[in-house]
Amino acid sequence: MSKVCRIAVVQMKSDTDKNRNLAQSRDYIKEAHYKKAHFICFPEFQMGFSPSEQKPIELSGISETVNTGNFVKSLSRYAKDNGVDIIGTIYEKARAKSKVFDSAVAIRKDGVIAARYRKIHLYNALGFRESDKFLAGNAIVKPFRFASAKIGLMICYDIRFPEMSRILSVQGAELLVIPSAWVHGIMKEEHWQTFLKARAVENGIYVIAPDQIGNIYTGRSMVVDPFGTVLLDMGNKEGMEVVELDKSEIEKIRGKLPLLRNRRTDVYKKNLSAFTGH
């Protein structure tokens, strides 16, 4: 199996109209095929920008199911038509009609859904309350084989919680894909860069973080290697870039900096109450 992955990273400004976003997504997928990418990663809120004045019931009205909704069905068709694996994001319909899940969906190039992850950490911080519109997921999705890599999925605010990326890394993830819509604010870009580098270095793993641009978001979509080198920073431009990743670098860097191997799990077990609250 090839050690090299060609990853297309999309930095987009989502419209409030999900059909426009779907059409734009189709064009990016075609471009990814043309540039011979193995898979393409879209940011959080690919389906649509939800302005602060949008009521929860209105957002719920545009949400869709993963298995039968037009947004994912269309992405699956584009994956098959272009021979490109896709990691996209949707507002996933929930039983509670006034709220939705913030979900990432991995679709293989044969159109089959490989994984679905519902964001577990909701952004109730710095003046925002995502829980007013969203339901929190309750499961970390185990790493799954995608293209020629093993992928761990997170979404945006999840990167502030290092336990999650560590769990995925220990479970065998080679790439962390983190669709995001990182909001502007004091020190926010610095936080974004710091967290992405830290998650990469502390786990000896590649981090791929496509971000929203425009509206209230910072851009700065990034790819970071296992030693913390920034391989891609898309600044404030809308568009798509392709990065080639060599998975053999993971083993090399973990050999020189064996952080996962040097963990003291025997000691950590004695302090689990600090994490569980019991």
Image (spheres, rainbow, N blue to C red):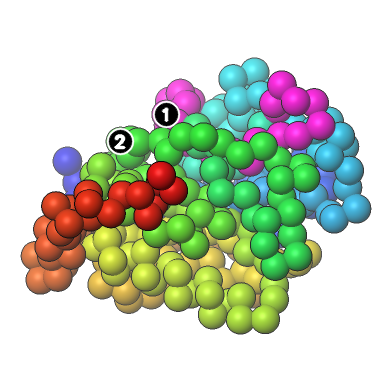
Q: Are marks 1 and 2 in contact (CB under 8 Å)?
A: yes
Q: CA distance from mark 1 to mark 2?
A: 8 Å
Q: Position of residue 99 (x, y in %)?
A: 76, 34
Which residue is found at the position 89% from the left and 43% from the top?
Answer: 55
Going from the N terminus, do you reach mark 1 or mark 2 first?
A: 1
Three-letter amino acid code at the position of disc 1 = Ala
Q: Is residue 212 above or below residue 172?
A: below
Secondary structure of the residue carrying tag 2 is: strand
Q: Position of residue 163 (x, y in %)?
A: 37, 54
- Left or right: 171 as drawn, with respect to 224: left
Secondary structure of the residue carrying tag 1 is: strand
Q: Position of residue 70 (x, y in %)?
A: 69, 25
Mark 1 Cα within 10 Å, few/some/many (few <14, many 20+)?
Answer: some
Q: Nearer the viewer, residue 132 or 220?
A: 132
Which residue is found at the position 71% from the left and 34% from the top?
Answer: 100
View extreme (left): residue: 255
View extreme (top): residue: 68
Q: Quadrant of the N terminus?
A: top left
